[in-house]
Image: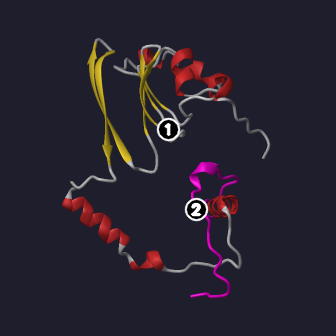
């Protein structure tokens, strides 16, 4: 594919410095998947806060950490990984500034409360018989990289587009070989 350029976020983030005032917004919140921080000042949530002071709040991910910290007067939060926690943030805003905040991690591994109507919808979805249909097979086990290639090629073909992307961290499982056991 020609003509595609992928730039580092720190090289384009400056274009958004005045979004809050242009939109007359109360807050400017960065939702990132940069990680908490990296070696040699690789852009992560810490450097995002320290180098780009126009954010009111940063909610991040990628580094699989639970984070509740402040950098350059900007609260930075992460809720961990694998849906073990749900992050809940309560914010008090005064004159387009964060006056106070409270961050709570809700441990979903031990969470017992649920909405029965929503649970019924989820269960009915999970019980759909066609979700167990075999749609193909592979003679060999595919590692995460091969699953990513298979998935993006299938998506590209199904959507009739020129290119398809999948972040490597989004592929979390291998695909076991099924031999010639077609169903």
Q: Is residue 129 above or below residue 114?
A: below
Residue 160 is inside the magenta segment? yes
Q: Which mark is residue 160?
A: none
Q: What segment carries the magenta color? A: 157-183
Depth check: 178 or 70 in front? Answer: 70
Depth check: 90 or 94 in front? Answer: 90
- In percent of the image, x 68 and y 68: which residue is there? 142
Residue 83 is inside the magenta segment? no
Place residue 73 in its image quadrant.
top left
User: Which quadrant, please, contains the C terminus?
Assistant: bottom right
Q: Provide the secondary structure element on which disc 2 rests.
A: loop
Please count the marks in the image.
2
24 vs 134, left or right, is: left
Place residue 137 in its image quadrant.
bottom right
- State the predominant SS element of the stretch in magenta: loop
Residue for badge 1: 61
Q: Is residue 18 above or below residue 91?
A: above
């Amino acid at each position: 594919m020609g003509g595609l350029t992928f730039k580092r976020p720190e090289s384009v983030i400056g274009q958004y410095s005045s979004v809050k005032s242009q939109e007359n917004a109360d807050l400017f919140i960065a939702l990132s998947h940069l990680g908490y921080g990296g070696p040699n000042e690789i852009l992560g949530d810490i450097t995002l806060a320290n180098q780009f002071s126009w954010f009111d709040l940063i909610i991040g991910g990628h580094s699989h950490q639970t984070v509740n910290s402040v950098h350059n007067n900007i609260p930075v939060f992460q809720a961990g990984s694998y849906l073990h926690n749900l992050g809940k943030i309560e914010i008090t805003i005064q004159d387009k500034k964060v006056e106070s905040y409270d961050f709570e991690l809700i441990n979903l591994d031990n969470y017992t409360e649920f909405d029965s109507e929503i649970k019924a919808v989820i269960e009915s979805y999970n019980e759909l018989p066609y979700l167990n249909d075999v749609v193909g097979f592979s003679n060999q086990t595919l590692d995460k990289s091969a699953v990513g290639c298979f998935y993006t090629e299938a998506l590209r073909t199904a959507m009739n587009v020129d290119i398809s992307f999948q972040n490597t961290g989004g592929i979390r499982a291998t695909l076991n070989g099924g031999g010639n056991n077609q169903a």
